Image (cartoon, rainbow, N blue to C red):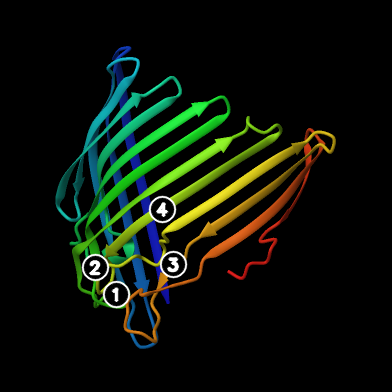
């Protein structure tokens, strides 16, 4: 019999000062408190109580700076004190936006972030340090008369990830912050509701290259929750005479890695791709009533 109790509180105060039309300052403080208790009992083991109490305090300051009609920046820094692991972390963050044309904008961003380990590990070992990541992002967006294009490149480096030497987090696990990893990729999005009368459609594609060495991984590998390629297409067509909107969507996802127990390779094989075509119809009975019908995976792909 295992019983968990978790109580959390979050207090935040944020103030802002506008000096002029070109400069704004935001600053404040926040505090996170978490108390986690777990009770374990069985027929052969006497009841055992364990858990942790976490107190994280932080100060932050952030500024909006408008250099001109085409150039603006957001610059900030955050200082966190992790009481349980006795850490003091400083995390700078900055972003820069440049208006390339009347309808286009290019932006760059960098940020450092820190985060506690999860309760599955902290309840057994309160000396675990915080995990960290650095984000680097470049984004371009174009908006014009019902058309939207967005593309984003990113790189994320992970450090101090929690590792353990058992099948899952347990009282006899040895925990350490020796894990690392990365994620990098490209996201593309296009939407258009002007080119074709009564039609609104959008396309999205993402490419992800990521590997991690964390948890009980024996080596750095692509996690089983991540896949490399994702694509979707959605279209909606409004028919005035029928007071109806008919819709279509197609979703594709490349395979995910898994460990085949019949081989020695860790996360060495891939599941097959996922495909789905869906159809839907919405009929406007009155301004307050809609009849909606949909068919998912209409072509019967065996995913």
Provide residue 198's location: percent of width, then percent of height: 71, 33
Mark 3 element type = loop
Which quarter of the picture shows residue 20?
top left
Residue 55 tag number = none
Q: Nearer the viewer, mark 1 or mark 2?
A: 2
Residue at the spot 67% in from the left edge and 66% down from the top edge: 300
Q: How much space separates mark 4 and mark 3, taking CA atoms? A: 13 Å
Please indicate, yes or no, whether residue 10 appears anywhere in the rendered image.
yes
Mark 4 / mark 1, whichever is N-terminal: 1
Residue under label 3, please give it: 256
**Residue in front for this viewpoint, 60 or 206:** 206
Is disc 1 in contact with disc 3, using a CB cutoff of under 8 Å? no
Q: With respect to residue 288, does 271 lie above or below?
A: below
Q: How much space separates mark 1 and mark 3, taking CA atoms? A: 27 Å
Residue under label 4, please give it: 207
Q: Nearer the viewer, mark 2 or mark 4?
A: 4
Residue at the spot 57% in from the left edge and 24% down from the top edge: 145
Q: Which residue occupies the extreme top position in the image?
A: 20
């Amino acid at each position: 019999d295992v019983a968990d109790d978790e109580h959390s509180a979050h207090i935040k105060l944020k103030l802002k000062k506008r000096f002029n039309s070109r400069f704004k300052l935001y600053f404040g403080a926040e505090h996170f408190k978490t108390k986690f208790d777990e009770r374990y009992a069985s027929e052969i083991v006497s009841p055992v109580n364990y858990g942790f109490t976490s107190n994280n305090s932080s100060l932050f300051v952030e500024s909006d700076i408008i250099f001109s009609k085409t150039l603006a920046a957001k610059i900030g820094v955050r200082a966190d004190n992790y009481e349980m692991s006795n850490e003091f972390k400083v995390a700078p963050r900055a972003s820069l936006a440049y208006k390339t044309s009347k309808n286009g904008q290019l932006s760059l961003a960098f940020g450092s972030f820190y985060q506690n380990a999860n309760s599955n590990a902290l309840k057994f070992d309160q000396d675990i340090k915080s995990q960290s990541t650095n984000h680097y992002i470049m984004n371009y967006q174009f908006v014009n008369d019902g058309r939207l294009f967005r593309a984003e490149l990113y790189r994320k480096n992970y450090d101090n990830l929690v590792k353990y030497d058992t099948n899952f987090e347990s009282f006899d696990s040895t925990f350490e912050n020796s894990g690392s990893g990365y994620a990098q990729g490209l996201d593309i999005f296009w939407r258009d509701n002007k080119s074709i009368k009564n039609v609104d459609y959008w396309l999205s594609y993402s490419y992800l290259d990521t590997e991690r060495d964390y948890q009980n991984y024996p080596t750095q590998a692509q996690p089983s929750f991540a896949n490399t390629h994702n694509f979707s297409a959605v279209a909606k067509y409004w028919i005035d005479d029928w007071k109806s909107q008919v819709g279509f969507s197609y979703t594709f996802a490349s395979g995910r890695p898994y460990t085949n127990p019949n081989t020695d390779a860790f996360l060495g094989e891939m599941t097959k791709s996922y495909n789905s075509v869906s159809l839907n119809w919405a009929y406007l009975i009155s301004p307050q009533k809609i009849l909606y019908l949909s068919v998912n995976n209409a072509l019967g792909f065996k995913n």
